[in-house]
């Protein structure tokens, strides 16, 4: 419920490798603001499905302002495209390919 009601999902980590919040944001088609730590920038392409900023208060605040200047709708087409990479159908296709199942 909470992610469905959100305009943006902010992940203000100081250090991280990844976050389980990211796939949930993709599922609910919510743009993200993530800090430039771990693999978060890889999972959230900057100015496509969200914004990447440095892990300090000023940078996070600037990213929040930039998000609302751009608007949620700016990110939705890219978000839907990127979301497909993480779909169950893509995962099963990859498993079938690796396993050599025809």
Image (cartoon, rainbow, N blue to C red):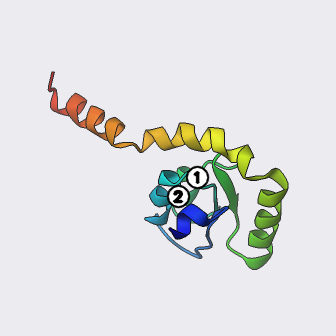
The location of residue 91, given as percent across then percent down, is 31, 40
Is 85 located above or below residue 42 in the figure? Answer: above
| Disc 1 secondary structure class | loop
Say which label, 1 or 2, has the lower sequence index.
2
Checking the image for residue 44, the label placed there is 1
Q: With 93 as the anchor, is 78 left or right in this view?
A: right
Q: Quadrant of residue 51?
A: bottom right
Neighbour class for label 2 at 10 Å: few (<14), some, many (≥20)?
many
**Residue 44 in picture, x, y percent from top left:** 58, 52
Number of numbered discs overlaid on the protein picture: 2
The quarter in which the C terminus is drawn is top left
Spatial CA distance of label 1 from label 2 is 10 Å
Residue 19 in sight from this viewpoint: no
The secondary structure type at the circle numbered 2 is helix
Give the vertical position of 35 relative to 25 (above or below).
below
Q: Is residue 7 left or right of residue 63?
A: left
Q: Position of residue 24 (x, y in %)?
A: 47, 59
Q: Residue visible at 65% across and 44% down?
A: 76
Residue 5 is labelled as: none
Residue pointed to by mark 2: 25
- Where does the image place residue 55, in percent across and percent down from the top left? 67, 72
Q: Identify which residue, 41 or 102, lies in the foreground.
A: 102
Label 1 environment density (alpha carbons within 10 Å; few <14, some 14–19, many ≥20): many
* Whether residue 12 can be seen here: yes
């Amino acid at each position: 419920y909470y992610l469905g009601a959100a305009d943006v999902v902010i992940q203000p980590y100081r250090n991280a490798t990844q976050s389980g919040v990211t796939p949930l944001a993709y599922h609910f088609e919510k743009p993200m603001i993530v800090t430039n730590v771990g693999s978060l920038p890889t999972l959230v392409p900057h100015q496509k499905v969200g914004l990447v900023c440095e892990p300090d208060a000023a940078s996070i605040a600037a990213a929040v302002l930039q998000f609302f200047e751009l608007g949620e709708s700016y990110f939705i087409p890219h978000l839907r495209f990127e979301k497909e990479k993480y779909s169950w159908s893509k995962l099963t296709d990859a498993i079938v390919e690796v396993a050599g199942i025809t």
